[in-house]
Amino acid sequence: MAAINTHYGELQDSYLFYNIAQKISAYLADHPGAKLYRMGIGDVSLPLAPAVIEALHKAVDDQAAKSSFHGYMPECGDPVLRKTIAEHYARRSISLDPEEVFVSSGASDELGDILDLFARPGSSLVMEPAYPAYVDANVMAGRKLIRLPAGDHNGFLPAPCPEAATDILYICSPNNPTGAVFNYEQLKAWVDFANENGSVILFDAAYEAFIEEETLPRSIFEIEGARTCAIEICSLSKTAGFTGTRLGYTVIPKTLERDGMNLNAMWVRNRTTKTNGVSYIIQKGAAAVFTEEGQRQIKENIAVYKKNAAVLTEALDSLGIWYTGGKNAPYIWMKCPEGMGSWAFFDLLLNKIQVIGTPGAGFGACGEGYLRFSTFGDPEDTKEAAARIKALLRTVSGT
Ligand code: PLP
């Protein structure tokens, strides 16, 4: 009989989005046609930038003519796109060799696949509340998971501690779900810790484009010492609306070595074995994101989401509610009022004002008592949701 990976049996069922869907169906069954204000969704709502659409159309036409047709693309990415991305980093004073940039089909794929570089079982540190894929990918790989709880005492930005001495350190900044962002000194502490312990940081920068404060790092490679301990995983999903189009990139410095092995060279070997690259058309569309016009257009879309964030945070500020995120991230992580649990507060919002958030308890035990709002929704719906939250919570807390 085939011996299979029984670690799949250790995965916890995630009831978070299933439970939310069940509660919404039940509400709609009792209130047919009710209008709901969906502030829970992590997907973008605005279309791709015109410059991207134009580049995609042109690339489709290229594929129609023998003279411009492209078959398999290089496994690690189109060299032109790799160079374009390296130049994008250079504009932020980060010097990369284009061969340190790997084009991918998105951050999720990379976050799972990259575990191939590490010996098994091995250990990984996940800061909770966490993006659920970190936990599940490690369980599937049979890795030992150390969960580092974060909380309002540290602004959901935990510092290194002895238990964190693991092979892999996941850091997500700006964070999903908390919207919290590490500053230079906080990240430097993690980089120093990783270099001292021989750990490798997997830095998830999926939301870097939402950082507006100039002093906050958008890349781990802004931190001195990161080139010997970090891998950065990026995505155009939220930056440029590529959730359904699919393109990301991963940076592995050529200076990253462990056990006498070079991780950049290993990843080249991995990619050339396990993928046949990202489609020509999508890579052409992605290249348009990095043009001056593309950058201006994606920033216009991000500005819409940021306006949503401002509308929601103004409401919370006026109520004196504690939260993280919103300013440099598309998520707002609020403390539920009056010590309510995440699900009780979710129910209250749904039943009283038809606003839907995401219960914090779904992102790990220390998320209990919090709720996540996404700012990717419709601006008019967001305004109405904020007004309803304000009116409701004034009555709940008596302010
Ligand atoms: N990392 C984080 C923290 C995310 O929130 C998401 C998506 O929501 C991803 C990675 C996945 O990004 P992608 O669409 O590129 O797979």
Image (cartoon, rainbow, N blue to C red):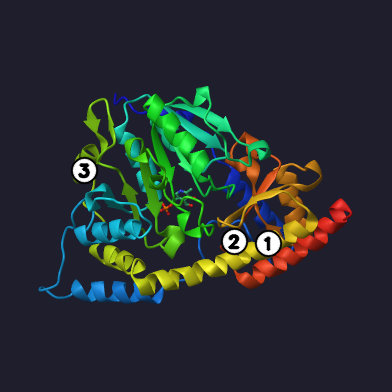
Please report the residue visible at 74 percent of the width from the left and 41 percent of the height from the top: 341
Please report the residue visible at 35 percent of the width from the left and 60 percent of the height from the top: 91
Q: Is residue 265 above or below residue 312?
A: above
Please report the residue visible at 61 percent of the width from the left and 36 percent of the height from the top: 150
Residue type marked 3 = Val
* Ligand 1 contact, mark 3 (Cβ < 8 Å): no
Whether pointer 2 and pointer 1 mark residues with C-beta atoms closer than 8 Å, the reply is yes
- Is residue 224 toward the left or the right of residue 72 in the image? right
Residue at mark 2 to residue at mark 1: CA–CA distance: 8 Å
- Is residue 374 toward the left or the right of residue 134 in the image? right
- Sequence-earlier tag: 1 or 3: 3
Question: In the depicted view, which residue is nearer to us: 54 or 205?
Answer: 205
User: Image quarter for residue 28?
Assistant: bottom right
| Label 2 Cα neighbours within 10 Å, binned few <14 / some 14-19 / many ≥20 | many
Q: On the image, numbered disc 2 is attached to which residue?
A: 375
Please report the residue visible at 71 percent of the width from the left and 41 percent of the height from the top: 369
Single out the residue that lies furthest toward the left: 67
Is label 2 in a helix, a strand or a loop? loop
Locate the C terminus and report the quarter of the image it occupies.
bottom right
Q: On the image, numbered disc 1 is attached to which residue?
A: 312
- Is residue 346 toward the left or the right of residue 285 in the image? right
**Residue 377 appears at what percent x and percent y?**
59, 65
Q: Is residue 104 above or below residue 245?
A: above
Q: On the image, numbered disc 3 is attached to which residue?
A: 268
- Sequence-earlier tag: 2 or 1: 1
